[in-house]
Image (tube, grey):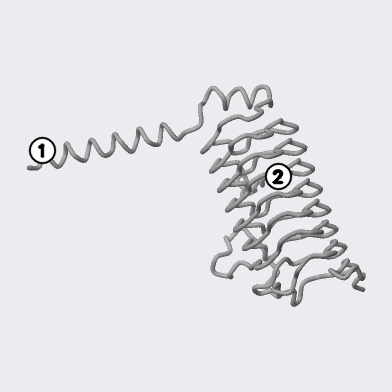
Amino acid sequence: MKLQILATGAVLLSAIASANSANAADPVIVNRLLTTKQCIGCILPNADLRGANLRGANLSGADLSLADLGGADLTGADLTGANLEGALLTCIDQPNNKQKCADLTKANLRDANLTRANLINANLSQANLRNAKLTLAHLSSFFIRADLRNADLSGAQMAGADLDGADLRGANMNPAIGLDQQQVPTNLTINKSTGSALPANLSRANLRGVDVSKVDLTNVKMERTIMPDGKVRR
């Protein structure tokens, strides 16, 4: 009986290992990406790209669902139409108690799928996120002067997000929710005064035509913000 149980357990473990292996990204493709930074339409689900130097890489149309891109440098990368559903784009620990966070400054994420992606503390300043799908994503990030026109932010968690100068025209922000204090990672500093409000900073952001009727903007910084009616908030 014991031998039968052990045999059954071994079979299950083997099956799980095979499934994990089947779902893992092809190391040959990963190496090619790291070497050439050219991987248009690559299939790389579950890829481990933590801390990778992918500055200026072309990953347009790539499948990076559930990939770990913590601390990766994607500055100026082309991720047009890429699938990043459930991907991790957060921080990794470095020596001397320092952290390196994912950097997507000026990256092109137009039409990208970032559903349920984790971008806590990631830098998406000046990134192109037009028409991007960011539903249910963790977006306590930096979106300074980012292009979020027509982006879908429904259900996104954005407490503490910095959208200074961001263009949100046509974006779907309902319902957008904040992170509960108990859900906030220890490495994340948020503006506690916003409570469950949306972002911490919407100064100079363009909200023309955006429906914010269901969004709690209490205590959100809004200096010179262009409101939905086109008027500038002083």
| Kind of residue at badge 2 | Asp
Name which residue lies at 82% across and 60% down.
Answer: 164
| Quadrant of res 163 | bottom right
Name which residue lies at 58% across and 64% down.
Answer: 184
- Tag 2 near tag 1, CB within 8 Å: no
In the rendered image, which residue does mark 2 sit on? Answer: 111
Asked if residue 187 is positioned above or below residue 75 in the image, the reply reads below
Compared across the picture, whether 225 is left or right of 175 comes to right
Residue 55 position, x and y percent, is 73, 33
| Kind of residue at badge 1 | Leu
| Residue sitting at the far left | 1
| Label 2 Cα neighbours within 10 Å, binned few <14 / some 14-19 / many ≥20 | many
Asked if residue 83 is positioned above or below residue 155 in the image, the reply reads above
Residue 7 position, x and y percent, is 16, 36
**Which mark sits nearer the N-terminus, 2 or 1?**
1
In the rendered image, which residue does mark 1 sit on? Answer: 3
Badge 1 marks a residue whose secondary structure is helix
Q: Nearer the viewer, residue 81 or 30?
A: 81
Distance in Å between CA atoms under marks 2 and 1: 54 Å
Q: Nearer the viewer, residue 152 or 223?
A: 152
Compared across the picture, whether 181 is left or right of 21 comes to right
* Image quarter of the C terminus: bottom right
Badge 2 marks a residue whose secondary structure is loop
Compared across the picture, whether 231 is left or right of 50 comes to right
| Quadrant of res 216 | bottom right
| Quadrant of res 179 | bottom right
* Image quarter of the N terminus: top left
Residue 108 position, x and y percent, is 76, 41
